[in-house]
Image: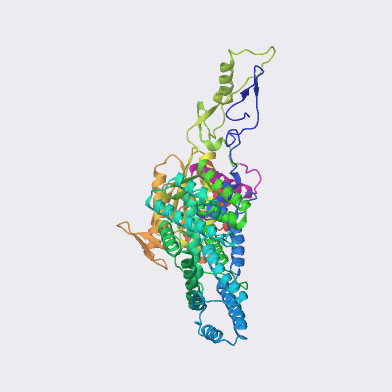
Amino acid sequence: MSTGAGGRRHGGRGYRYGRWHGGPDPLAAPYDLGNAVDEIGDSVLGGSGVREALRELLRRGTEGRRGLDELRRSVRERLRRARTAGRMDGTLQEVRELLERALTAERRELFPDPDDVARLAEAELDALPEDTAGAVRALKDYPWRSDEAREAFERIQDLLRREVLDSSFASMKQALENASEQDMQAVKDMVADLSQLIDGHNRGEDTDEQFRAFMDEHGQFFPDDPQSIEELIDSLARRAAAQERMMAGLSPEQRAELSDLMSQAMADMGLASEMSHLQDALRQARPDLPWGQQGQVPDGEPSLGMGDATSAVAELADLEALSDQLSQGYAGASLADIDEELLERALGRPAVDDLAALRRLERELERQGYLNRSDGKLELSPKAVRRLGATALRRVFATLDAPGRGDHDVADAGAAGELTGGSREWRFGDEQPLDVVRTVKNAVLRTAGMPHAAGDRRVRIAVDDFEVVETERRTGAAVALLVDLSYSMALRGTWGAAKSTAMALHSLVTTRFPQDAIQIIGFSSTAQVLRPETLAELSVDTLQGTNLQHGLMLARRFLARHRDAEPVVLVVTDGEPTAHLEEDGTPFFCWPPMPETIARTVAEMERVARTGATVNVFALDPDPGLIRFVHELTQRAGGRVFQPDSDRLGEYVVADYLRARKGRRAH
């Protein structure tokens, strides 16, 4: 393939070709969806809906890629470890330890001094407030005599400055260690410029140029290197919300003391009003974050400083959000909801590659025409339904173990009716015997003017040459398959077998016997005609009722439109009729069955029998009452009752159709 859009010519010597670098390979084979479509089909044929089947596939993963479930298990393990990262009061504890060290050293220095000034200093130390924040505030202007005490108190001041900034800006604690006045001024300038930038963004006045200018001047404070103002705001807002969540996880006493210490530190830096304004601006920019909400915070052995505690809480919040996204268990869930950045931070780049593979799979299923999305609803396309039916049919034939069945396309001239003496062109699906003489004659006439090799007398027959013998009666059949949709089918675990059987029979009729007509009718409290696409997505009806009468009524109307075809009626059910239509068309339900329900069902069965149809019933429940009733019912139409296991239902129904379509007149 060429480099870029085409080969490059080198002088007069022709073209040189190399690897394609212009994006996706335009000659690459289509993404192979065969296994994925079959896995979705397995779930659908097992009774699931399309959306549930796709979600199950994405949860399991495919083709060596981790699915959502495995990714979520890994995230939950990270979440378990994050919950034991440490205690939130580390800064407060460290300040208390440094304060105690300072006071001890100062008292040790004052004790041997007999001067009254030393006694007054001791009294001042003894009168300090009991809370840590109050004591630190009271000692702000204290003239320390002990160098060790002064150093410890200065460490408190430095620690608070760095922790307060680190809780708002990641990695600031290390960056400001032993910071100079110039370093602190750079921080103040950054916070002021940042507030202006976010204010402009909230007003819709920000530009890429302003963001780039800000990063050029203050980028050293943002090691994560955001590429846009949206990324910058998102990072800062998440950390600010995590800081609030961290504070909410402290006890009321701890929270009050730490808040007081933070306020003192920001006031000392001259940042109190700027940091408050920045917090408000971030809230305005990202109101969707859980501001002020109390959630889970880490609780482990190590004591964490404010910055580390904020990072731990932010990680915990991110992992919780990522776990929810991977669960896809909320309304309107989509793979697009999963944050790739969070996923990469939690599990690394391979996890993002696995997610990309799942997204591509979902996208290709729609692009290649297997799934359709309309008004947010996911449906199997006709292309997928055909494949689904073919799969179901293939499984049915795999279980048919009688010798010689093959495709069951029995070419029996006697069964085709009396010969008329005429012939016609062959059409796909015809079962009439070939008119050999006219077929060969057509081939000879067609090739008469073509050149032939010397001595070659072979006659080459093409598809268009074939003719079949005309008969008085077409061998077509009209097939009505009635499938019970009542809730008991799901409870007994037979709904999947019934759906698979209906799909298989529809595929058989439409592909192997196109001259036949088929209608699938589902019945519960009422009956309805089902398209294959509808059947694939359909779940059993939670409404009560087994309205076989209405189903037979629709079957009779269908047969009336195909009077020249062999009528075939097949019923799949697991219960006696418990519903019927009243005179005004409203459904009536009662359990145990009312005599009127039985009478109306029997009357409708007799009307079907008068069309010449044989009605065979496949009873999926061995209940004696059901078996006795359907035996009495089918006798009125010269039919039979079958009691197959649910896993052999398709075999029974397809075999019975193949037998019945020959017609009673053919025996």
- Residue 315 falls within the magenta-colored stretch: no
Report x, y in % for residue 146. 61, 77
Residue 115 versus residue 176: which sits nearer the camera? 115
Residue 277 versus residue 88: which sits nearer the camera? 277
Q: Is residue 26 above or below residue 529?
A: above
Q: Is residue 491 above or below residue 124?
A: above
Residue 477 versus residue 95: which sits nearer the camera? 95
Q: Which residues are magenta?
A: 381-406
Q: Is residue 201 left or right of residue 103?
A: left
Q: Is residue 514 above or below residue 325?
A: above
The residue that appears at 61% across and 25% down in the rendered structure is 7
Q: Is residue 51 above or below residue 245?
A: above
The residue that appears at 62% across and 73% down in the rendered structure is 301
- Residue 402 falls within the magenta-colored stretch: yes
Viewer can see residue 542: no
The residue that appears at 53% across and 47% down in the rendered structure is 362
Viewer can see residue 126: yes
Q: Is residue 273 left or right of residue 154?
A: left
Report x, y in % for residue 358. 57, 49
Q: Which secondary structure type mostly characterizes the magenta part of the structure?
A: helix
Residue 121 versus residue 643: which sits nearer the camera? 121
Q: Residue furthest left?
A: 584
Report x, y in % for residue 200. 40, 51
Q: How is the image coloured?
A: rainbow
Figure quadrant of residue 322: bottom right
Image label count:
0
Q: Is residue 632 left or right of residue 399?
A: left
Figure quadrant of residue 303: bottom right
Quarter placement of the N terminus: top right
Report x, y in % for residue 444. 59, 17
